[in-house]
Image: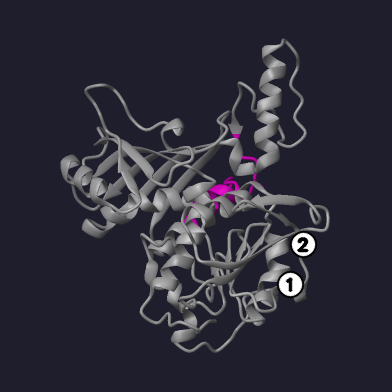
Amino acid sequence: MTAVQTSLSPSSVCLPNRPLRVAVLGASGAVGQELLQLLEQRRFRVAELLPLASPRSAGQSLGWQGRALTIQPVEASAFEGVDLVLASAGGSVSRQWAPLAAAAGALVIDNSSAFRMDPEVPLVVPEVNPEAAFSHRGIIANPNCTTILLSLALAPLHARRPIRRVVVSTYQSASGAGARAMEELRSLSRTVLDGGEPVSEVLPHSLAFNLFLHNSPLQPNGYCEEELKMLHETRKIMGTPELRLSATCVRVPVLRAHSEAVNIEFHEPFPVEEARALLAAAPGVELLDDFDANRFPMPTDVTGRDPVAVGRIRQDLSEPNALELWLCGDQIRKGAALNAIQIAELLIEAPGAQAGGGP
């Protein structure tokens, strides 16, 4: 099932500039919990918050703004009168419920892969392609976490000198596989330290003092699904359908925050100092590039924080038209929940967002 095709007026593309009825679909998961925290931390104007999840999680209690809320089971009637749905419950759930929520009049910002490559659904990183958000027909897709982090570093450089080719290796934390994977890493690390044999039940292999190539399904071309997401999503976000990009994705024993080693080839030389200045000024980016102290971004620098930290920017010794850099970003935050809320904020702050209006 693809996005609902509706005819929206320019004003209805925006969110109403008033307190909103917000539903969080997948409220019990790691990203769902982060969405709830960020809505509170960023003082998002919420008239009513509706935590939704599968029947398995329904009935659980969670805290928000000092109150206890009960998670409700997702059903069609739950979306009646809802302005905004922040969905992070997996592709199959989104394919089932997002079109129904959009048809009921809500704007759905979906964190799954269900609609990312649908040509009728915008794929948005607000610092990179904010204009795309205004072409939605009720559903906006949140990109893959590694793609979001990468695009923040690529976009300011590409705007100055077009990129020809990107080669990226990712170092992805347990948080990318959800709250259960994070807990498994904790427990299996204790098992190893106590001299036991770690047996993984959530991930295909134990991450305790270990790493393995990303476990998403392998495709006929030898790349896994996660690696191809980075290729196709980066092209769509940056409007570069011919961009050459090759990714190798690795799961590493880090609880939270992903890292990426990125080689960027341009059509001409790109002075390192110019690239450093552009990244230092780029929205959503924090430069951490201290060669004298050999101090560059680490996952602990960005855990629980909004910026993507970029550093170790240097000339590629093998190619005069290429630069190398390293980045780290919180996968649950900017790689998922924060980006979704920023999309909503973008549509509220737009000139067309009038009090009392709505999708």
Q: Is residue 111 visible?
A: yes
Q: Residue at x 69, y 74 (%)?
A: 79
Left or right of 352? Residue 224 is: right
Give residue 355's position: percent from left, percent from top: 46, 82
Left or right of 61? Residue 101 is: left
Displayed quadrant of residue 255? top right
Q: Residues within 10 Å of mark 1 (few under 14, many from 20)?
A: some
Q: Residue at x 48, y 67 (%)?
A: 344
Q: Which mark is residue 237?
A: none
Q: Residue at x 26, y 47 (%)?
A: 279
In the image, farthest residue toward the front: 66
Give residue 25's position: percent from left, percent from top: 67, 61
Please tell me whether mark 2 sits on a helix, a strand or a loop: strand
Label 1 sits on residue: 78
Q: Are marks 2 and 1 in contact (CB under 8 Å)?
A: yes
In the depicted structure, whether residue 179 falls above or below residue 103: above
Q: Which amino acid type is shown beneath numbered disc 2?
A: Gln
Give residue 100's position: percent from left, percent from top: 70, 77
Q: State yes or no: residue 224 in magenta.
A: yes
State the CA–CA distance, disc 2 to disc 1: 8 Å
Label total for image: 2
Along the viewing direction, whichever of 351 and 251 lies nearer the viewer: 351
Please tell me whether mark 1 sits on a helix, a strand or a loop: helix
Q: Residues within 10 Å of mark 2 (few under 14, many from 20)?
A: many
Along the viewing direction, whichever of 236 and 182 lies nearer the viewer: 182
Q: Which amino acid type is shown beneath numbered disc 1?
A: Ala
Give residue 95's position: percent from left, percent from top: 69, 68
Label 2 sits on residue: 72
